[in-house]
Image (cartoon, grey):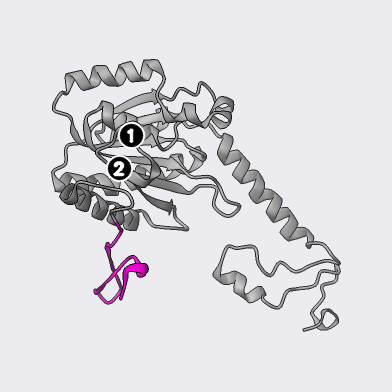
Amino acid sequence: MSDDKQPQAANGAVDNPWQELRRLTPARIALGRAGTSLPTRPQLDFQFAHAQARDAVHLPLDTQALADGLKARGRECLLLHSAASDRHTYLQRPDLGRRLNEDSARQLDQFARAHPQGFDLAIVVADGLSALAVQRHTLPFLERLEEQALKEGWSRAPVALVQQGRVALGDEIGQRLNARMVVMLIGERPGLSSPDSLGLYFTYAPRVGLTDASRNCISNVRLEGLSYGMAAHRLLYLMREACRRRLSGVNLKDEAEIPVLEGETRVGNFLLEN
């Protein structure tokens, strides 16, 4: 349809004929135009989403609120900090977010000496690039995960709550706790439609120096993305298979069967289907 035949509002904005598709996706499509620019409303929506993403990056993690929520559920916590002293340093020096500061390292080592038998599972929660995601989704997700972990009979270390942490820090914590497996819950880099996306990183036999090839990732855990139940289902599959095969990462594929409405199941990774 040519521009002169497209419906035009009283303010001069021209609607996009694909506008109906916006009901199906949060992506910024079919925004219309006013002359050669965006209409005012989509422009303001973009600026608002950009501000939300920036706020998510800089929002401090309230570890005490998380600790109180976990203790109310009967879970012990360890409050830790990376070697990045503050948010500015954390954003400028990713390497410092990948290791513990000296006080936290001593705290973990002291705890590990009191528990020489180690643990099957260590759960680490870190702010990453969206403390908002961690604050919103950690407690409801862990409620589902730990319910199943208890059924599996896995021993669990206290939940480690880390400020200014990055993904690789989970490996150091798991190694110091002598944990067979570690799961890192961390805020993912915000997008303009997802400022509160939680990522899950799983490592079998964690140790300092491992690369991303040794980890499995489940991303976009949030109400508008991957549900808590489905994320826990996928993660538990990886954990069971890791215990059986004694590995994680690129050699461990997500082939979890996904329940469907008819009560049947299908393989989750379509790339592996025949």
Based on the displayed image, in which of its 4 quarters is residue 77 positioned?
top left
Vertical order, 273 against 87 (above or below): below
Does 263 sit left or right of 133 as displayed?
Answer: left
Residue 17 picture location, percent across and down = 71, 78
Residue 151 picture location, percent across and down = 15, 48
Q: Over which residues does the magenta segment extend?
A: 253-274
- Find out whether residue 111 is within the magenta segment: no
Residue type at mark 1? Answer: Asp
| Mark 1 residue crowding within 10 angstroms, few (<14) / some (14–19) / many (20+) | many
**Dots 1 and 2: beta carbons under 8 Å?**
yes
| Image quarter (top left, top right, bottom left or bottom right) of the N terminus | bottom right
Residue 110 can be seen in this image: yes
Vertical order, 29 against 245 (above or below): below
Residue 64 picture location, percent across and down = 41, 27
Which disc number belongs to residue 203?
2
- 62 or 175: nearer the viewer: 175
Residue hosting label 1: 171
| Image quarter (top left, top right, bottom left or bottom right) of the C terminus | bottom left
Residue drawn at (48%, 26%) of the image: 96
